[in-house]
Image: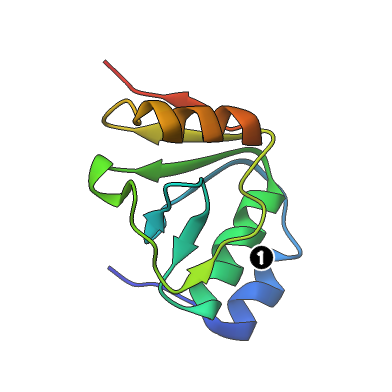
Amino acid sequence: GEATGGLDALDMLARYRADFAFVGAGGLTADGALTDFTREGAALRSLMLARGAAAFVVLDRDKFGRATAVEIAGFGDGVGLITDAVPSRGLAARLAALGVAVTVPA
């Protein structure tokens, strides 16, 4: 598929508001930090989370405990996490403390 990024994408997205925002990420550290592989990717995901009236991160269990290079700002209160497995007790507690609601579809 096609993707867009860079300063033009950030500039364009900053002008829009969305009812829903769904983003992926490179990893979710054991202490609840959401991370990505590049500064550009992290900035784009952070902006998307901020611009969505309802914001969700979609991750599979393989990303739990993984730390990639750059932290994504804005992962906390009001952001939902949709995933395929219940996080470990420690990670679940950290996410709850951050205000992240976890959803594991049946």
Frontmost residue, 5 versus 78: 78
Q: Position of residue 96 (x, y in %)?
A: 58, 27
Residue 97, relative to residue 73: is it above or below?
above
According to the image, what is the colour scheme of the structure?
rainbow
Frontmost residue, 50 versus 29: 29
Left or right: where does residue 59 sit relative to residue 55?
A: left
| Secondary structure category for the residue under label 1 | helix
Image quarter in which the N terminus is found: bottom left
Frontmost residue, 21 versus 101: 101
Q: From the image, tell me which residue sits under label 1.
A: 13
Q: Residues within 10 Å of mark 1 (few under 14, many from 20)?
A: some
Q: Position of residue 54 (x, y in %)?
A: 63, 35
The answer to which quarter of the image holds residue 85 is: top left
List the single residue furthest toward the right: 15
The answer to whether residue 86 of the structure is visible from this angle is yes
Left or right: where does residue 75 sit relative to residue 31?
A: right
Q: Position of residue 21 (x, y in %)?
A: 56, 45
Image quarter in which the C terminus is found: top left
Residue at the location (30% across, 51% down)? 63
Residue at the location (54% across, 78% down)? 39
Q: Position of residue 6 (x, y in %)?
A: 55, 83
The answer to which quarter of the image holds residue 80 is: top right
Residue 12, relative to residue 8: is it above or below?
above
The answer to whether residue 99 of the structure is visible from this angle is no
Residue at the location (50% across, 47% down)? 31
List the single residue furthest toward the front: 90
Left or right: where does residue 40 sit relative to residue 19?
A: left
Residue at the location (61% across, 48% down)? 75
For badge 1, the amino acid type reads Leu
Frontmost residue, 31 versus 79: 31
